[in-house]
Amino acid sequence: MFRSEYADVPPVDLPIHDAVLARAAEFGDAPALIDGTDGTTLTYEQVDRFHRRVAAGLAEAGVRKGDVLALHSPNTVAFPTAFYAATRAGATVTTVHPLATAQEFAKQLTDCAARWIVTVSPLLDIARRAAELAGGVRKIFVCDSATGHRSLIDMLATTAPEPRVAIDPAEDVAALPYSSGTTGTPKGVMLTHRQIATNLAQLNPAIPAGPGDRVLAVLPFFHIYGLTALMNAPLRQGATVVVLPRFDLEQFLAAIRDHRITALYVAPPIVLALAKHPVVAQYDLSSLRYIVSAAAPLDARLAAACSERLGLPPVGQAYGMTELSPGTHVVPLDAMRDAPPGTVGKLIAGTEMRIVSLDDPTRDLPAGESGEILIRGPQVMKGYLGRPDATAAMIDGDGWLHTGDVGHVDGDGWLFVVDRVKELIKYKGFQVAPAELEALLLTHPGIADAAVIGTYDDDGNEVPHAYVVRQPAAAGLSAGEIMMYVAERVAPYKRVRRVTFIDGVPRAASGKILRRQLRESA
């Protein structure tokens, strides 16, 4: 069993809105949220006051403890206000992908029996159709304004009393994000107020922040990574969050320059753009102090190329999953220059880990041997909503969550994630990690992006199949050249046996490759 080097942190038994905004009065007029597109700014005092007024407006409209409210919005400065207002009113917030179809949205609404929706006017038609398909939705509110729908802005003027709801942080569910569905049917992940708030306290010793720090929020708030790293954590510590609704490289670079961003929390595709795209050289990014990448594997060579180009410490990685609130590992800020390349970090405070054999899950493996990663700690989810069997399959009787990820620990406690158990390719009995081949493919100067899955050849063998996006200047790059490039650099059983050229690699908003879509197309 591996244990964190950090001292344990006591459980944070506070509602998430109080855990995050407890010091709002202290931070006062300091900027909490800035719209990176138009400069609209909310101070800490305003965020605190506004979310309390909106909570009163929601309670006045009928929102009660135990209700589920669906928050359906891209990143805006109103998103945190809506989230904290809903939890203060006693609701559980289920966050919805802003690009979800009406049918996908309706499926989520039905699964969690949501009664309320908060959306934005550009997405209102989708929200209405989803509500009609699902049934049971009492009202749709908007963050901005739309005829026939009450606005959160209007709620700021309500004279209704602030709701006083008795919340049990250990039992009451604050957030209900849905797992990405890359390996199965999306499921509602029940995260209590205590689990989310305690995870913030666990992360703080390794990645502290405070007034003067400026974080750029381009990864989506609806995803647990964005919700934690880009919303809850910085606002809890008095930092300023500059919000962008989507990733556009030039807008992203301009925001770093104009707002003097000090910290980036990103996914590997953004690291790839920072490392390789020529337009990056046109922007002053000298305010940056560090970059953290998570949500998907990041190749050590790509991380090094990014940090070298920007003159920064090596890009640090973090590890976790929605079911873990989400963090378990991170490269500490004070160790970024010394951490071994490719590590996803060390255990955060109060967290335990086991590495167990893939062939015999009852057998624990020592440092240096790869197996499935198991996690235990106060951040382990309450369970999957309405799916006790799936919960039991994920969390065993001793409280260990089976991540489905394969990794090993070195002698100093650094974790290296090899791949997903279910994504490993079995070529004639040998295990091939798609992430390893993807990282190698990205070193080819003619390849802009790549994904690898297992498909079956005429003999019934599962073989590595690469889906490749060519660089614009490499239109003549052939499948044969790519297969030869890989063959020269890997063991024979790891060779890419098939290549398909595509316009773009399908990814979730978190940056994870949607391998299931590639398998379906194959």
Image (cartoon, helix red, strand yellow):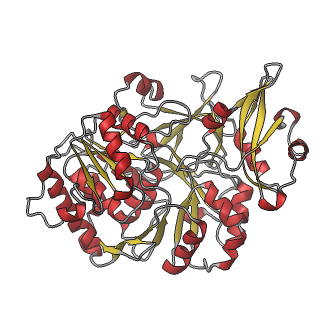
Say whether residue 311 is visible: no
User: In the rendered view, would you say 211 is above or below 77?
Assistant: below
Left or right, 165 with reference to 18: left
- Please state, as top left, top right, bottom left or bottom right, where the N terminus lies in the image: top right
Q: Residue at x 52, y 69 (%)?
A: 263
Q: Nearer the viewer, residue 229 or 386?
A: 386
Q: Residue 368, percent across and down? A: 69, 39
Left or right, 516 with reference to 460: left
Left or right, 517 with reference to 139: right
- Please state, as top left, top right, bottom left or bottom right, where the C terminus lies in the image: top right
Q: Residue 390, percent across and down? A: 44, 25
Residue located farthest toward the top when viewing the structure as drawn: 459
Say whether residue 477 is visible: yes
Q: Nearer the viewer, residue 372 or 70?
A: 70
Q: Residue 485, percent across and down? A: 88, 47
Q: Residue at x 85, y 41 (%)?
A: 490
Residue located farthest toward the front when viewing the structure as drawn: 147
Q: Residue at x 43, y 38 (%)?
A: 104
Q: Nearer the viewer, residue 71 or 167?
A: 71
User: In the rendered view, would you say 285 is above or below 402?
Assistant: below
Q: Nearer the viewer, residue 96 or 357?
A: 96
Which quarter of the figure has residue 44? bottom left
Q: Residue 332, percent across and down? A: 55, 60
Q: How many marks?
A: 0
